[in-house]
Amino acid sequence: MSKPNLDVRDVARLARIQLSDEEVTLFQSQLGHILEYVEQLSTLDVSNVEPTAHAAPVFNVFRADETHPGLPRERVLANAPHSANNLIVVTKVIE
Amino acid sequence: MSALTELTISDLQAGFRSGAFSPVEALQSLEQKIASVDGEVGAYLARDFTTALAAAEKADVSLPLGGVPIGIKDVINVVGEQCTCASKMLEGYKAPYDATVISRLRAAGAIPFGRLNMDEFAMGSSTENSAYQITRNPWDTSRIPGGSSGGSAAAVAAREAFATLGSDTGGSIRQPAALCGVVGLKPSYGRVSRFGLVAFASSLDQIGPFARSTRDCAALLNVISGKDPRDSTSLDLPAEDFTSQLGRNLRGVRLGIPKEYFVDGMDPRVRAKIEEAIQTCASLGAELVEVSLPHTSYAVGVYYIIATAEASANLARFDGVRYGYRAKQPSDLLDHYCRSREEGFGSEVKRRILLGTYVLSSGYYDAYYLRAQKVRTLIRRDFHDAFEKVDALICPTSPDLAFKIGERVNDPLRMYLADIFTIAANLAGICGISIPCGFVQEGGKNLPVGLQFLGKSLDETRLLGIADAYEQSGATSVLATCP
């Protein structure tokens, strides 16, 4: 396992979270400690071990390709931060 | 009428069916109890008596849970009610549909009632990460109730609910059940549909019950479990009656004592209570076998890589577009996302999203995420090998008693280590139950200790039978009322 060199600002950009300067300092130190702790995993030899993604003995669950009614439009729009004309209003994507 | 709130579900139902009292009276007694104690305990984020009373008036008490009110953790969707996950991100959000567990409760005649406090998005071990309020441990209100389902546990302990639903990703049912002195069951992965449960870490999350007896937990599992076409991870299994092994003794039962769960660093008073409980099980006929789960010390590290990685993906949906919090007057789309998430999420959620994003990011995936998945395999094998030798494992639920509010908020790693005895069960997908096994006196207060039984995957019927045998021995009163 490589030495942790987490740059909180860089990761926050990837995660789409703006951080205050105080948060950057705090998280940099706290996450550093957590990563030091998880370093212990590097002491194990896992070269011949298959990974486990989940513990359920099911794979490739298929359903019939049929359409079903979705949620009522007004119930969905009731939770939208901003809606008009029965549509969700979004922040401008293309200039 | 307040004495009604003392009853277990099975006693409550006997009263309904004999006509001694009605579901409306039960709900009214709950209302009075909540009015008198919840100002101090703070278990409920919201409750709607009007809707619940209307349901109670029409209740069919012949149904499996007819007329029984069930409190719901604020992470499970109940149509028309708030579902905030105790986050500012979902303030004002109204569930547009019922979770499958809620549909099943309704079909069984139960009345989903109230929204219970939790750590924001189920991330935490003390319920201090709620964006709305502190929940206090009813046994000592200067202490935390555990988490993340702290409201669900505290409500049952304080007689503000007969039973509740919570969710368990790394111990979030069993740990608060232990610290509040109630019974909490984490079913096996795949046993209960998660459709309508707001996702935290999808390979680990399970919904399960809190109650004041093992029997009540079994009755609830009978209702909420089963295959659901809307959750592809729910398993299609033959129907099973989880109460079928209740009322037995422990003769012929082999209980494994995992030696790695009795290590330095745990509270010696907790250890003493657990050792006492183990001896009680031996006196009830159980055969005790020492077993080893050699990869136990890696479980917390594996968990905080896998759970945060999955959380970073699951919580990407909170972008302030279709629902949830949206920042005011964003300058562009990137600013919209970054500020909505900055202002909507609390510290612990941000910390975990950042950690999860990092361990999945290019150049680190193999070193962290893939390696953690491989160690997860080793942890699963440990349990598999142990269950070749024994029927269930017996161990502590938490290494500590309930700690003081504020004591660990500035030390996330120390908070994470509180889950050391519970998270391996989620990684392995097995079932587990925490049951009260006594009290430790501290500062003039009785603080509950939880005994944990772990069973192999899909072995809930036997697990519940073992827990019930211990409970029925009367070694400790599971139903003890907190002051």
Image (cartoon, helix red, strand yellow):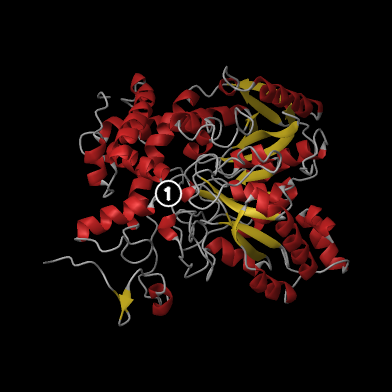
Q: Nearer the viewer, residue B76 or B140?
A: B140
- Chain letter behind tag 1: B
Quarter residue B357 falls in: top left
Residue that numbered label 1 is attached to: B202
Residue A23 found in image quarter: top left
Specify few, some or many for label 1: CA neighbours under 10 Å numbering under 14, 14-19, or 20 or more: some
Q: Position of residue A89 (x, y in %)?
A: 27, 73
> Does the rendering let one see residue B391?
no
Q: Is residue B472 above or below residue B87?
A: above
B452 left or right of A92 in image:
right
Residue B280 percent location from the top left of the image: 78, 27
Q: Residue at x 45, y 33 (%)?
A: B410
Viewer-nearest residue: B464 or B81: B81
Q: Quadrant of the N terminus of chain B?
A: bottom right
Q: Residue at x 51, y 35 (%)?
A: B423
Q: Is residue A1 above or below residue B48?
A: above
Look at 31% across and 58% down and name the residue there: B319
In this view, which residue lies farthest toward the left?
A: A95
Is the C terminus of chain B in the top left, top right, bottom left or bottom right quadrant?
top right
Q: Give SS at disc 1.
A: loop
Q: What's the amino acid at mark 1?
A: Ser
Between B481 and B370, the one nearer to me in the picture: B481
The spot of residue B27 in percent (x, y) is: 74, 65
